[in-house]
Amino acid sequence: MLQVARAITHLNRWIGRWACLAVLIIFALLLADVVMRYLVGSPAVWTAEMATLIFGVYAIIGGGFLMAERGHVNVDIIYGTFSRRKKAIVDIITWPLFALFVLVLLWQGWDLASEAIADNERSNSIWKPYLWPTKAFIPVAAILLFLQGLVRLWSDVRVVRGLPIPDDIFGAPAATESEAHAAAGQSGEIQE
Protein backbone atom coordinates (compact mmCIF):
# COMPACT_ATOMS: atom_id res chain seq x y z
CA MET A 1 0.00 0.00 0.00
CA LEU A 2 2.87 2.38 0.71
CA GLN A 3 4.06 1.88 -2.90
CA VAL A 4 0.60 2.87 -4.21
CA ALA A 5 0.52 5.99 -2.01
CA ARG A 6 4.05 6.90 -3.12
CA ALA A 7 3.08 6.42 -6.78
CA ILE A 8 -0.02 8.63 -6.43
CA THR A 9 1.91 11.39 -4.66
CA HIS A 10 4.78 11.14 -7.16
CA LEU A 11 2.36 11.27 -10.12
CA ASN A 12 0.54 14.33 -8.76
CA ARG A 13 3.82 16.10 -8.01
CA TRP A 14 5.14 15.27 -11.49
CA ILE A 15 1.95 16.54 -13.16
CA GLY A 16 2.04 19.69 -11.00
CA ARG A 17 5.61 20.47 -12.00
CA TRP A 18 4.80 20.05 -15.69
CA ALA A 19 1.55 22.01 -15.37
CA CYS A 20 3.58 24.97 -14.12
CA LEU A 21 5.01 25.26 -17.62
CA ALA A 22 1.52 26.12 -18.83
CA VAL A 23 1.95 29.54 -17.22
CA LEU A 24 4.85 30.22 -19.58
CA ILE A 25 2.76 29.17 -22.58
CA ILE A 26 -0.13 31.36 -21.42
CA PHE A 27 2.28 34.26 -20.93
CA ALA A 28 3.72 33.79 -24.44
CA LEU A 29 0.24 33.65 -25.99
CA LEU A 30 -0.96 36.77 -24.21
CA LEU A 31 2.29 38.58 -25.02
CA ALA A 32 1.84 37.65 -28.69
CA ASP A 33 -1.72 38.97 -28.46
CA VAL A 34 -0.51 42.33 -27.16
CA VAL A 35 2.36 42.56 -29.65
CA MET A 36 0.01 41.79 -32.55
CA ARG A 37 -2.45 44.37 -31.29
CA TYR A 38 0.17 47.13 -31.25
CA LEU A 39 2.25 46.12 -34.29
CA VAL A 40 -0.45 44.99 -36.70
CA GLY A 41 -3.41 46.78 -35.21
CA SER A 42 -5.42 43.67 -34.37
CA PRO A 43 -4.66 40.62 -32.26
CA ALA A 44 -4.50 37.11 -33.66
CA VAL A 45 -7.89 35.46 -33.52
CA TRP A 46 -6.73 32.46 -31.56
CA THR A 47 -4.18 33.58 -28.94
CA ALA A 48 -6.48 34.79 -26.15
CA GLU A 49 -8.84 31.84 -26.55
CA MET A 50 -5.97 29.34 -26.59
CA ALA A 51 -4.61 30.97 -23.41
CA THR A 52 -8.04 30.57 -21.80
CA LEU A 53 -8.27 26.89 -22.76
CA ILE A 54 -4.77 26.18 -21.47
CA PHE A 55 -5.56 28.06 -18.25
CA GLY A 56 -8.62 25.88 -17.77
CA VAL A 57 -6.47 22.75 -17.92
CA TYR A 58 -3.82 24.35 -15.69
CA ALA A 59 -6.36 25.35 -13.05
CA ILE A 60 -8.04 21.95 -12.81
CA ILE A 61 -5.11 19.56 -13.20
CA GLY A 62 -3.11 21.09 -10.33
CA GLY A 63 -5.56 20.01 -7.61
CA GLY A 64 -3.79 16.76 -6.75
CA PHE A 65 -0.42 18.52 -6.70
CA LEU A 66 -1.76 21.20 -4.36
CA MET A 67 -3.17 18.55 -2.05
CA ALA A 68 0.14 16.68 -1.99
CA GLU A 69 1.95 19.92 -1.14
CA ARG A 70 -0.81 21.16 1.22
CA GLY A 71 -1.10 24.22 -0.97
CA HIS A 72 -4.86 24.68 -0.81
CA VAL A 73 -6.10 27.68 1.12
CA ASN A 74 -7.23 27.02 4.68
CA VAL A 75 -9.10 29.30 7.03
CA ASP A 76 -6.33 29.39 9.61
CA ILE A 77 -8.02 31.54 12.25
CA ILE A 78 -8.71 28.45 14.36
CA TYR A 79 -7.26 25.54 12.34
CA GLY A 80 -3.81 27.17 12.17
CA THR A 81 -3.47 27.12 15.95
CA PHE A 82 -4.08 23.35 16.19
CA SER A 83 -1.38 20.75 16.68
CA ARG A 84 -0.69 18.30 13.85
CA ARG A 85 -2.81 15.69 15.61
CA LYS A 86 -5.81 18.04 16.00
CA LYS A 87 -5.48 19.12 12.37
CA ALA A 88 -5.47 15.46 11.33
CA ILE A 89 -8.63 14.80 13.37
CA VAL A 90 -10.40 17.79 11.80
CA ASP A 91 -9.27 16.65 8.34
CA ILE A 92 -10.58 13.13 8.98
CA ILE A 93 -13.95 14.47 10.19
CA THR A 94 -14.31 16.79 7.16
CA TRP A 95 -13.00 14.27 4.62
CA PRO A 96 -16.51 13.11 3.63
CA LEU A 97 -17.28 16.68 2.48
CA PHE A 98 -14.13 16.64 0.36
CA ALA A 99 -15.11 13.24 -1.06
CA LEU A 100 -18.62 14.47 -1.86
CA PHE A 101 -17.23 17.54 -3.65
CA VAL A 102 -14.76 15.51 -5.71
CA LEU A 103 -17.29 12.82 -6.60
CA VAL A 104 -19.74 15.47 -7.81
CA LEU A 105 -16.89 17.07 -9.78
CA LEU A 106 -16.09 13.68 -11.30
CA TRP A 107 -19.73 12.94 -12.12
CA GLN A 108 -20.44 16.35 -13.66
CA GLY A 109 -17.01 16.52 -15.31
CA TRP A 110 -17.57 13.11 -16.88
CA ASP A 111 -20.92 14.28 -18.25
CA LEU A 112 -19.38 17.48 -19.65
CA ALA A 113 -16.43 15.66 -21.19
CA SER A 114 -18.41 12.78 -22.68
CA GLU A 115 -20.95 15.15 -24.24
CA ALA A 116 -18.18 17.35 -25.63
CA ILE A 117 -16.42 14.32 -27.11
CA ALA A 118 -19.63 12.80 -28.53
CA ASP A 119 -20.71 16.11 -30.08
CA ASN A 120 -17.16 17.04 -31.16
CA GLU A 121 -17.91 20.33 -29.39
CA ARG A 122 -16.29 23.49 -30.67
CA SER A 123 -16.16 27.05 -29.45
CA ASN A 124 -18.53 29.68 -30.85
CA SER A 125 -15.68 32.06 -31.69
CA ILE A 126 -14.31 32.82 -35.15
CA TRP A 127 -11.44 30.39 -34.57
CA LYS A 128 -13.77 27.58 -33.38
CA PRO A 129 -11.28 25.35 -31.50
CA TYR A 130 -12.35 21.97 -30.18
CA LEU A 131 -13.41 22.13 -26.53
CA TRP A 132 -13.38 18.42 -25.74
CA PRO A 133 -9.61 18.21 -25.11
CA THR A 134 -9.92 20.79 -22.33
CA LYS A 135 -13.12 19.32 -20.91
CA ALA A 136 -11.62 15.81 -20.94
CA PHE A 137 -9.15 16.94 -18.28
CA ILE A 138 -11.95 17.58 -15.74
CA PRO A 139 -12.68 13.93 -14.84
CA VAL A 140 -8.96 13.08 -15.04
CA ALA A 141 -8.19 15.87 -12.58
CA ALA A 142 -11.04 14.78 -10.31
CA ILE A 143 -9.66 11.24 -10.19
CA LEU A 144 -6.14 12.49 -9.41
CA LEU A 145 -7.49 14.78 -6.68
CA PHE A 146 -9.60 11.98 -5.18
CA LEU A 147 -6.66 9.57 -5.15
CA GLN A 148 -4.46 12.16 -3.45
CA GLY A 149 -7.31 12.80 -1.01
CA LEU A 150 -7.26 9.10 -0.08
CA VAL A 151 -3.51 9.31 0.49
CA ARG A 152 -4.03 12.41 2.62
CA LEU A 153 -6.74 10.65 4.65
CA TRP A 154 -4.36 7.76 5.25
CA SER A 155 -1.63 10.17 6.37
CA ASP A 156 -4.06 11.87 8.76
CA VAL A 157 -4.96 8.50 10.27
CA ARG A 158 -1.25 7.77 10.68
CA VAL A 159 -0.72 11.14 12.39
CA VAL A 160 -3.54 10.39 14.86
CA ARG A 161 -2.00 6.98 15.57
CA GLY A 162 1.46 8.52 16.04
CA LEU A 163 3.00 6.79 13.04
CA PRO A 164 5.56 8.43 10.74
CA ILE A 165 4.35 10.08 7.54
CA PRO A 166 7.25 10.22 5.08
CA ASP A 167 7.05 13.22 2.72
CA ASP A 168 7.88 11.13 -0.36
CA ILE A 169 4.90 8.84 0.31
CA PHE A 170 2.21 11.07 1.81
CA GLY A 171 3.18 14.55 0.63
CA ALA A 172 3.89 17.56 2.79
CA PRO A 173 2.86 17.27 6.44
CA ALA A 174 0.57 19.81 8.08
CA ALA A 175 2.61 22.56 9.68
CA THR A 176 2.13 23.47 13.30
CA GLU A 177 1.56 27.14 14.14
CA SER A 178 5.20 27.67 15.16
CA GLU A 179 6.44 26.02 11.94
CA ALA A 180 4.09 28.14 9.86
CA HIS A 181 5.29 31.33 11.53
CA ALA A 182 8.92 30.31 11.14
CA ALA A 183 8.37 29.52 7.45
CA ALA A 184 6.73 32.89 6.95
CA GLY A 185 9.56 34.65 8.79
CA GLN A 186 7.21 35.76 11.57
CA SER A 187 8.70 33.80 14.43
CA GLY A 188 9.61 37.00 16.25
CA GLU A 189 13.26 35.99 16.57
CA ILE A 190 15.83 38.46 15.37
CA GLN A 191 18.56 36.72 13.48
CA GLU A 192 21.88 38.44 13.13
Image (spheres, rainbow, N blue to C red):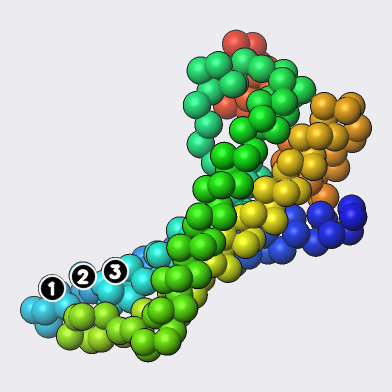
Classify residue 88 by image quadrant: top right
Residue under the image location 50 percent in, 70 percent down: 110
Mark 2 residue type: Val
Residue 182: quadrant of the picture: top right
In this picture, residue 105 sits left or right of residue 90: left
The quadrant of the rendering that contains the N terminus is bottom right
Q: Amino acid at mark 3?
A: Leu
For mark 1, give the secondary structure. Answer: helix
Q: Secondary structure at mark 2?
A: helix
Q: Earlier in the sequence, mark 1 or mark 3?
A: 3
- Tell me, yes or no, whether the two marked residues, 3 and 2, touch with CB atoms within 8 Å: yes
> Residue at coordinates 36% horizontally, 87% vertically from top-left?
119
Q: CA distance from mark 1 to mark 3?
A: 13 Å
Left or right? Give the position of 120 relative to 127. Answer: right
Circle 2 is placed at which residue position? 34
Give the amino acid type for the residue marked by disc 1 in the picture: Tyr
Q: Residue at x 34, y 84 (%)?
A: 121
Residue at image mark 3: 30
> 74 above or below 149?
above
